Image (cartoon, rainbow, N blue to C red):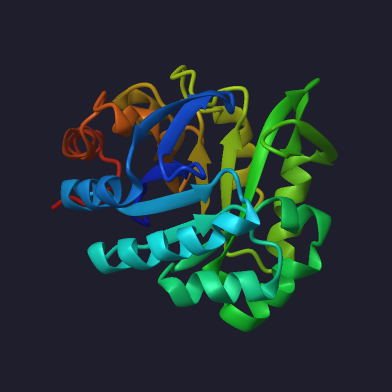
Amino acid sequence: MLTKRIIACLDVRNDGQVVKGIQFKNLKSAGEPIQLAKKYYEQGIDELVFLDINTNDDKRDYMIDVIQKVAQEIFIPFTVGGGIRTLGDVKKILRAGADKVSLNRAAITNPTLISQAAGMFGSQAIVVAIDAKKSGSSWNAFIGGGKIDTGKNAVEWAIEAVARGAGEILLTSIDSDGTRNGFEIELTRNISQKVSVPVIASGGAGCSGDFFDVFSKGFADGALAASLFHFDNVKIAELKKYLAKLQIPIRTK
């Protein structure tokens, strides 16, 4: 069985602050990205995800600078997303030091970008992020910070994205985001069972037990959290020890 991954997410605003909200709203400052990245690396996090949540074109140089500095401080996989629209953007992010790029809106509005990027840089470097919200008895994929319903069924879109070359799915439940009520297990399980690539669950982590549930019941390959780590509600080392005792395959120091 493959080792499960614990991942920290840093949502970076255009003022250079890492922020966190609830269901993509009411953002609260959580610190400075380079310092937090180094902190999590030293604490034993398996991977980091940086998301530029403003994606203003005049702030892209700032993000490139942050990526370069973070890449010098950490030696674990590092994914960057937000505002990536073209192959040129993908190339720039990877050259700055990121290991993977995360495509969300651009993947939906221009699905051929997935296959083009995977063909040029390899599927392992291309993550498709899906922000999903419950719609009746299923889930739809949303863009625009959770404001725009694309009408695409989230499970079907995940399958299509993988067929086009995505090497990983980053699945965020908008309904659960920031609530600390647990991951969206049913949706995670549905997608995990239908795609051949790793699925990272995001949105709703509130305690160590939530990670156990999403790994054991949702079949996630990784679990991502933000505020839980930012505000020291759960210690990474303690979380890993807890999961290891429950026989979840996890990397420990």
Q: Residue at x 51, y 48 (%)?
A: 51
Q: Residue at x 29, y 50 (%)?
A: 37
Q: 70 and 139: which one is in front?
A: 70
Residue that lies at the very extreme toward the right in this rendered image: 151
User: Which of the image's four quarters has the N terminus?
Assistant: bottom left
Residue that lies at the very extreme toward the left in this rendered image: 253
Would residue 18 be found to the left or right of residue 229 on screen?
right
Would residue 211 be found to the left or right of residue 253 on screen?
right
Q: 25 and 61: which one is in front?
A: 61
Relative to 9, residue 78 above or below: below
Q: 138 and 86: which one is in front?
A: 86
Q: Position of residue 74 (x, y in %)?
A: 26, 62
Q: Residue at x 33, y 22 (%)?
A: 207
Q: Is residue 93 visible?
A: yes
Residue that lies at the very extreme toward the front in this rendered image: 58
Q: Position of residue 129 (x, y in %)?
A: 62, 49
Relative to 186, residue 181 above or below: above
Q: Position of residue 178 (x, y in %)?
A: 48, 23
Q: Is residue 124 visible?
A: no
Q: Position of residue 228 (x, y in %)?
A: 34, 28
**Number of numbered discs visible in the structure rendering:** 0
Would residue 222 be found to the left or right of residue 106 on screen?
left
Task: Tell me the quarter of the picture where residue 96 sits.
Answer: bottom left
